Image (cartoon, helix red, strand yellow):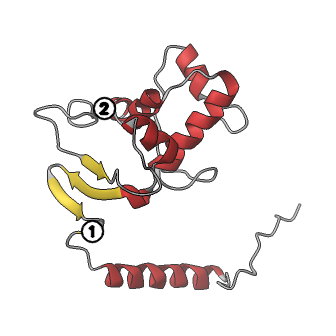
């Protein structure tokens, strides 16, 4: 991740294509839009060497390649899985869209996600998850959080702070 010294430019200079993920989110929000935007802004501030297409490729084609999945996903190509995200371009937060890729990188956010297909199957339509009992899922998540916090002795009122280890 290169905290304090971003790896993106160093990787490009070494002839490597960086990839982006949201599996570790201590410095940016847990969504790919925030990750692309942060990477773009930080690297542009250092050397101006990236454009929005670079970031979109880091998040799609290059990520699939790095995971050994480029033959199956990462781009819209006949024969590949149809993993597709459709974004609303009529939302006030992105109007007017002149450069779609630039808009995704500079202003994209999860609230724009209208439809999602995974391997050609619609899993989100009109901004709503398909075939997901959201109230039941939320209840399970809260119960899990409460169980873990209770087992660890952590209050959920915001008063808990990590304690330094004794020397």
Residue 129 — which label?
1
Q: Which residue lies furthest to the right in this view?
A: 167
Q: Quadrant of the C terminus?
A: bottom right
Q: Residue visible at 70% across and 31% down?
A: 5
| In the depicted structure, whether residue 158 falls above or below residue 126 | below
Q: Residue visible at 67% across and 81% down?
A: 154
| In the depicted structure, whether residue 117 falls above or below residue 75 | below
Can you give x and y, in whole percent of width and height, for residue 75 in the image? 25, 33
In front of the other: 90 or 135? 90
In front of the other: 110 or 146? 110
| In the depicted structure, whether residue 140 falls above or below residue 167 | below
Can you give x and y, in whole percent of width and height, for residue 30 in the image? 51, 56
Q: Distance between the residues labelled 1 and 2?
A: 28 Å
Can you give x and y, in whole percent of width and height, for residue 104 in the image? 43, 43
User: Which quadrant of the view contains residue 46?
Assistant: top right
Q: In which quarter of the image is the N terminus?
A: top right
Disc 2 is placed on an element classified as loop
Q: Residue visible at 14% across and 50% down?
A: 120
Specify few, some or many for label 1: CA neighbours under 10 Å numbering under 14, 14-19, or 20 or more. Answer: some
User: Which quadrant of the view contains residue 67?
Assistant: top left
Can you give x and y, in whole percent of width and height, for residue 155 in the image? 68, 85
| Foreground disc of the pair 1, 2 | 1
Q: Name the residue under label 2.
A: 68
In front of the other: 144 or 165? 144
Disc 1 is placed on an element classified as strand
Q: Quick check: marks 1 and 2 in contact, CB under 8 Å? A: no
Residue 34 is left or right of residue 66, and the answer is right
Q: Which residue lies furthest to the left in this view?
A: 79
């Amino acid at each position: 991740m290169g905290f304090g010294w971003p790896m993106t430019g160093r990787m490009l200079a070494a002839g490597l294509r960086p990839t982006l993920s949201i599996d570790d989110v201590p410095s940016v929000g847990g969504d790919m839009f925030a990750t692309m935007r942060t990477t773009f802004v930080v690297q542009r501030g250092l050397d101006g060497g990236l454009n929005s297409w670079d970031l979109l490729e880091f998040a799609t084609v290059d990520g699939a390649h790095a995971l050994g999945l480029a033959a199956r996903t990462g781009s819209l190509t006949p024969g590949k899985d149809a993993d597709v995200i459709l974004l609303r371009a009529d939302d006030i937060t992105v109007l007017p869209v002149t450069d779609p890729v630039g808009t995704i990188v500079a202003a994209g956010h999860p609230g724009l996600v209208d439809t999602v297909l995974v391997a050609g199957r619609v899993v989100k339509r009109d901004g709503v998850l398909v075939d997901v009992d959201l109230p039941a899922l939320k209840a399970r998540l809260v119960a899990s959080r409460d169980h873990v916090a209770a087992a660890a002795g952590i209050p959920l009122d915001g008063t808990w702070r990590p304690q330094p280890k004794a020397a």
